[in-house]
Each structure stands twice: as C-alpha cells, then as structure tokens.
Amino acid sequence: STDLSQNALKPRGLLYEVYPLSGAKNPILKGNISLVIDEKQKKSSKSWDKAPLWSPIELLIGIDSMGMQAPARIIKSSGDSEVDLAVREWTAEVNWVRLLPPGSYRLVLGP
C-alpha cells in the first residue's frame, strides 16, 4: 500500500531583510521570523492562516549602543493594520544591538 499522507505545512511567517540607509542593494542581515508570527497568532483575534493577502512592509529603525533609539517607523504599510502592529511589536523585541552596529536602517519584511 502507498502512503499518501502529507506533512503539515510550516506556519505562515515573514522573511526580513535589513539595509543600511546608504542605499546598498544587498541586505546586511536577513532571516525568517515564522516563530514570532506563531506567537502573535495566539494573541491576535485574527488568524494569520486566514489573513488576506498583504504587501511587504518597510520600516526605519535607528540603533545605538543601548538598542533601538525609538519605536520603528513605518514608511510603507503592509495594507493590514494587524500585520503592521505585529511587525512593530516584533521590532521592539529584537535585540538589534547584538545584530547590527549603531546606525539607521531600512527594514523590509514580506510574506
């Protein structure tokens, strides 16, 4: 008999890329944050698995020796206020000072 079972799909998440504001074309940091989205899904009244399609979101972040200088500033919304809020909360939780030298950066996240 043939086993036709399928493995479950990974939870929906985000890919992120960080660019210096100098206009570099290649990201200096990138990764996936699917686990963060799983946590937000539990807290949110909206299911990420059933969320409408949304566009990539872009933010500005400033890092100094103590961490983020101020909350991330959205420069291009995803088109979904709950996604925007979850992303801003995620940026506040990341220990950016361990990942990036002091400076200003453009953070791009997409589905």
Image: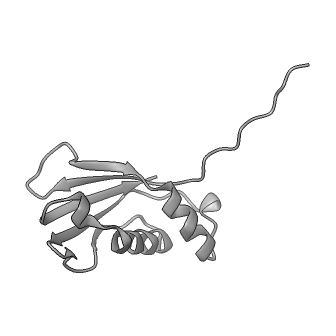
Give the residue drawn at x 36%, y 67%.
Answer: 77
Foreground residue, 21 or 29?
Answer: 29
Rendering colour mode: one colour
Give the residue drawn at x 19%, y 78%.
Answer: 69
23 left or right, relative to 16: left
Instruction: State which quarter of the image contains the N terminus.
Output: top right
Residue farthest bottom in this picture: 70
5 left or right, relative to 30: right
- Seen in the picture, residue 13 relative to 36 is either above or below; the reply is above
Foreground residue, 87 or 67?
Answer: 67
Tell me where residue 56 appears, x and y as whole percent: 38, 56
Q: Looking at the image, how many numbered discs can be counted on the residues?
A: 0
Foreground residue, 74 or 93?
Answer: 93
Give the residue drawn at x 26%, y 50%.
Answer: 29
Tell me where residue 21 appears, x and y as whole percent: 12, 58
Tell me where residue 44 appears, x and y as whole percent: 59, 75
Give the residue drawn at x 52%, y 58%.
Answer: 35
Residue farthest right in this picture: 1
